[in-house]
Image: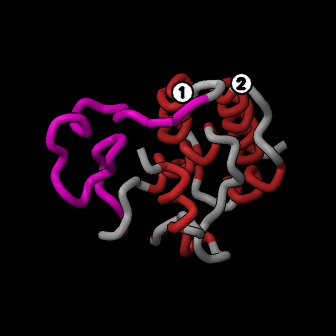
Amino acid sequence: MSSTATDRSSIRQQLTQALGHEIDDSSWEVLEALPAEAVGAELIWRVEALRPQVPVQGTIYLHPIRPQAVDGAPPGTCSLCGDPLPAPERFRCDSCAIAAQLVLGQPVQLIGATVATAQSGSLIQDEEIARTAWIG
């Protein structure tokens, strides 16, 4: 097994542990197409921070997971972590959007079919679904 495959296997195990269940194969295929830094520690800590915020039943409201996102985060920053947004019409950074999809049990969806798009552009495929699923 190559080093990259071992790293990806370790990341999948860590995400599975953070989620409390296996990642579905279609979502994992999408995550495998992303650069390792996009699905490594940055995604794992977000999943760990967001998962406890999802109730078994009832309204889901995802609270900020970093202090800079709580108090007057400037426009153009993620509502959850305070990182810069990939596009002006977005309200979550790519890492938080993917983490939210995972903790909500939604399949991970990306814009575009190439890794180049995933590395440089907005990652969420259906922004309207994302907005309606995560409005809080």
How crowded is the residue under tag 2: few (<14 C-alpha within 10 Å), some, or many (20+)? few
Amino acid type, residue under disc 1 in the picture: Glu
Tell me what residue is drawn at x 52 percent, y 34 percent. Answer: 59
What is the magenta range? 58-87
Describe the element under mark 1 as helix, strand or loop: helix
Amino acid type, residue under disc 2 in the picture: Gly
Q: Quadrant of residue 109?
A: bottom right
For residue 70, above or below residue 56: below
Q: Quadrant of residue 113?
A: bottom right
Q: Quadrant of residue 126?
A: bottom right
**Relative depth, front residue between 4 and 34:** 34
**Relative depth, front residue between 101 and 110:** 101
In this image, 15 relative to 45: left or right?
right
Dot label at residue 79: none
> Cα distance, mark 1 to mark 2?
10 Å
Q: Quadrant of the C terminus?
A: top left
Is 42 one of the magenta-colored residues?
Answer: no
Residue corresponding to mark 2: 20
Task: Verify CB contact (< 8 Å) between mark 1 and mark 2.
Answer: no
Decide which of tag 1 and tag 2 comes sooner along the chain.
2
**Relative depth, front residue between 15 and 124:** 124
How crowded is the residue under tag 1: few (<14 C-alpha within 10 Å), some, or many (20+)? some
Q: Name the magenta segment's main secondary structure.
A: loop
| Residue 40 position within the rendered picture, expressed as x and y whole percent measured from the top left | 56, 41
Residue corresponding to mark 1: 48
| Residue 12 position within the rendered picture, expressed as x and y whole percent measured from the top left | 72, 37
Report how many numbered discs are placed on residues in the image.
2
Tell me what residue is drawn at x 28 percent, y 45 percent. Answer: 82
| Residue 33 position within the rendered picture, expressed as x and y whole percent measured from the top left | 68, 61
| Residue 99 position within the rendered picture, expressed as x and y whole percent measured from the top left | 55, 43
